Amino acid sequence: MWAGPEGYQEPADVDAVIGSLAMLAACLPQALAQADRWLCEALDAHRVRHDQGGDVAHGVFSASLCLEDAAGAAGNLFGFLREARAHSSHLAGLDGGEAR
């Protein structure tokens, strides 16, 4: 079988990686929301500071906005990977004598 520079040997290898990445993308929104919640709760409890003397609330608010955007992007990523997998799961390698 042909092994490309990326190390994939079969379409099933690519499909498996796409599936694993889709599972990761599906978990990202929850992980990002938990990180956001922790930062907000730490701010409310006065358990976080800015190491350069900056505005802690602004830092947490800015991080929160970025985490929210990242969660949305992860949702989009999951959708694209799910769609890619819908196609890649039907691909198979060619044996030596098969026609293309």
Image (cartoon, helix red, strand yellow):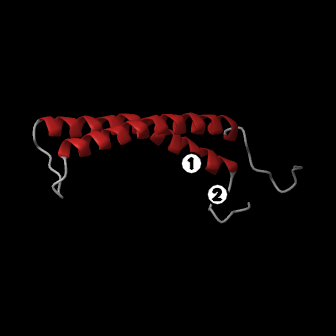
Q: Which residue type does callout 1 highlight? A: Val
Q: Is residue 84 left or right of residue 66?
A: right
Q: How many marks?
A: 2
Residue lying at the far bottom in this picture: please name it.
5
What residue sits right under mark 2 in the picture? 8
Q: Which mark is residue 17?
A: 1
Q: Which mark is residue 35?
A: none
Badge 1 local density, few (<14 within 10 Å), some, or many (20+)? few
x, y percent for residue 38: 22, 38
Q: Which residue type does callout 2 highlight? A: Tyr
x, y percent for residue 65: 35, 38
Q: Nearer the viewer, residue 25 or 95?
A: 25
Q: Nearer the viewer, residue 30 or 99?
A: 30
Q: Nearer the viewer, residue 28 or 17?
A: 28
Image quarter in which the N terminus is found: bottom right
Residue lying at the far left in this picture: please name it.
46
Q: Residue at x 47, y 38 (%)?
A: 74
Q: Secondary structure at mark 1?
A: helix
Q: Residue at x 14, y 46 (%)?
A: 48
Label 1 to label 2: alpha-carbon separation:
10 Å
Badge 2 local density, few (<14 within 10 Å), some, or many (20+)? some
x, y percent for residue 89: 67, 39
Q: Secondary structure at mark 2?
A: loop
Q: Residue at x 22, y 40 (%)?
A: 39
x, y percent for residue 20: 51, 44
Q: Residue at x 62, y 62 (%)?
A: 7
Q: Is residue 68 left or right of residue 55?
A: right
User: Which comes before the other along the chain, label 1 or label 2?
Assistant: 2
Q: Nearer the viewer, residue 66 or 94?
A: 66
Q: Is residue 76 left or right of residue 97?
A: left
Q: Are marks 1 and 2 in contact (CB under 8 Å)?
A: yes
